[in-house]
Amino acid sequence: MMRHRHLHRRWWCWQRWQQFRPSPCSLIQKKIFSSSTWEGNDGEHRQEQQQRTRHAMSQEGDVVVMSEERSSFEMARKKRDHHVLRKLRALLKKAEFSRLVGMRYGIDIACVQKADHATFLLTRGNALPLVALDRLLQKEEDDSSSKSSSSSSSSSSSSTTDHLERAAMELVVEEYGCFVTEAMVDNDEDNDDKTPEVLPPLAKDLRMGELKNLTNPQNWYPLARSLAPRKIIVHVGPTNSGKTYNALQALTNAKSGAYLGPLRLLAWEIYDKLNSKGIPCNLVTGQELDYVEGAQHVSCTVEMIQTERRMEVAVIDEMQMIGDKNRGSAWTSAFLGVAADEVHVCGDATMVPMVEELSELCGDHVEIKWYSRKTSLSISPPVVKLKDLKKGDCLIAFSRKRILAYKQLIEEQTDLKACAVYGSLPPETRRAQAELFNSTSSNTDVIVASDAIGMGLNLNIGRVIFASVRKFDGKQDRYLLATEALQIGGRAGRFGTEFEHGYVTTIKKDELKELSRLWKQPLPTIHKAGLQPPLECLYEVLNARPDQNLADILHFFSTSSVLSQRFFLTGLDHLRTNAMAIQDIPLQISDRLTFVVCPARVKNPFVRTMYRKYAQGCVDNIAPVDITLPDYFQFPRTEPQLEKFETLHSVLDIYLWLANRIGQEVFVDFEYAKAKRVEVAELLADALTLLGTQDGASRRRNNSPSGGGRRRNKNVAHHHHQQHHHQTTEYHDKKAKKRNKPPPRKRPRR
């Protein structure tokens, strides 16, 4: 019984093998394509075996077999096709072919490189002209072999090889482009069903290698490089030396040109001067765009320069700011990118080596002109009492609180009238206060100011008095730098006024020695220029890596950028703070970059709230200004009220800045915001004028900026004593109630 089962199983297996056995043709094809060589005795032996097999198959009648001549032709054709397709796979992997397909069909090179070459050859290989490709690739092999044998004709053979390779690419590019396009369409349709692509970290992404390389920023401006060599004229000198005046003379005589200043105040001043002389000039700042018909000149802030516009003369003022930690990149971009035949650079001696180095980098010709101060300047004895102040004096303090307190004390203790200027004031208010001080009819004798007078204001100052030679720079309390002391003190003694000789001094006697040391200290030269990645670079990274937010990308650039020794990164911390404030708002890439570079101080809670509102309004395609003035808009008298008005003005500036870039069709309250900004600036000017003159008799010396503890009012001291005694008694009562004990008895005084 067991033997019959075994025989039956063997018979069943043989039947199944006869039913599903492989075809002899398939065995032959497998042998054909598995063989790598077709010459020699092994090849002839294989051919004889294949002919015998085909003869046996024809006798059995299992399959229809072609003649021997036709079968050999088919095998040779398949061999050739296999050989050509194998070479085509190497051709498709070349970067030149991917670039050709991308340019021809407008496809991203990354998408071309991601395409599956094996799928293309399997599905589209029969549609390719394999005969022509075989001839071209065979010629390319022959040329490469001849090149290796003879080294004399290497250049001609390499050019022939490149020509044949490009011809082969042209035969394949059309079919491959259609294949990639169809694959992209299928990928978009199935995108929801597929799992998202896992991208590598930014530090390991090969595409970031070229973008983080910032070693040659001069190549970012092709129009300026096409004008090389430009003529660079450097005007070097201290304040009141006439260097800017001579540079502006060249701008006035030119047919077209631009003035690039550090402040809106300076841009306004040059705009008014040129138009008053009959030279049409446009005004371009972050908040103002005032175009004059037929104007070929423009007065703008340094960040607003248009590097795509060619001009005859350009003037870059305060060039020593190129080493500033916050705004230095703006001067670097302006110098490298301004497309002018003649560039005039104004500044002190610290920027000369940096300008020479950048000029050599750009291939420009440099000419240096040195200037000396037109009026004398010396250090005078200290002013210990405010009663010793006189007309034309400028008292320097470094905070809003101290400036306002000194203004009140001067008007209380002396017969002089004072005005105030500090950095957080709007430019319109600063200019109004400067006009009050310079005017002979306003009866304003003294100005109390911060280091904001160092740039942008022409003041008739006879003596600069430092209330302190220390300042808080936002991080620490430190002594003034030599450049800061010279910039501020140099405002004393203006040429062409009644103060032909300028004096600099302090209030405290012990600080006069420190001021004298700063005055004699040599100025340090600038060895590095500020640099910032261009917006085009950030846009490309955001477009290529949608999985990364802008704050992380800015952090990547700040930590991984490759720089040369002459540059350092600036301003990325401010950009990153702005980016984090609107990180959760779904803005478009271009709008997000616009918001990030906006000069908004988002650390202020009110500014941050309005900044986010405007970003959300940009998403909703309508962004109202959403600001109303406080009830006390008559004239704010206290420092918190002044600060609130200054914050309101800064928010209105942000609104106008964004409207000029994104469009007034989104920021619909442009005209309203413009009118309210003027109103707020006027109210601040009135408040500063009235501050210190109202209820002057009721003010006491306990409001002194230095404390004034020795001359406190007795009533005030008694009030503080009673308040402290009441708080102490209330504290003991609460403790006693908790412990269920009676309150302590008051001990009689001995």
Image (cartoon, rainbow, N blue to C red):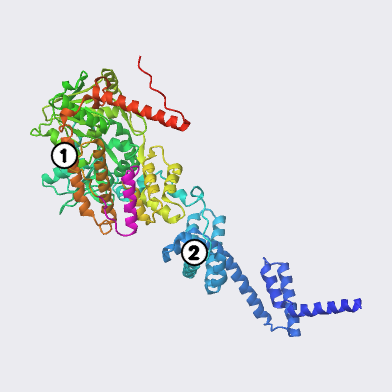
Q: 154 or 123, which lies in front?
A: 123
| Quadrant in which the C terminus is drawn | top left
Work out how far the residue at label 1 is from the one at label 2, CA to CA, in angstroms: 81 Å
Query: For this view, does 329 lie left or right of residue 502?
Result: right
Toward the top, the furthest residue is 750
Query: Is residue 461 visible in this depiction of the protein?
Result: no
Compared with 59, 717 (above or below) is above
Tag 1, which secondary structure? helix
In the rendered structure, which disc, 1 or 2, sits on the residue that comes first in sequence?
2
- Tell me which amino acid carries mark 2: Leu
Q: Dot 1: few (<14), some (14–19), or many (≥20) neighbours within 10 Å?
A: some
Residue drawn at x 50%, y 67% as measured from the top left: 190
Q: Which stretch appears magenta?
A: 599-627
Toward the front, the furthest residue is 742
Between disc 1 and disc 2, the foreground one is 1
**Residue 579 appears at what percent x and percent y?**
38, 48
Query: Does the segment drawn in magenta span residue 407?
Result: no
- Tell me which amino acid carries mark 1: Asp
Residue drawn at x 37%, y 33% as measured from the top left: 475
Residue 164: mark in rendering: 2
Tag 2, which secondary structure? helix
Residue denoted by label 1: 686
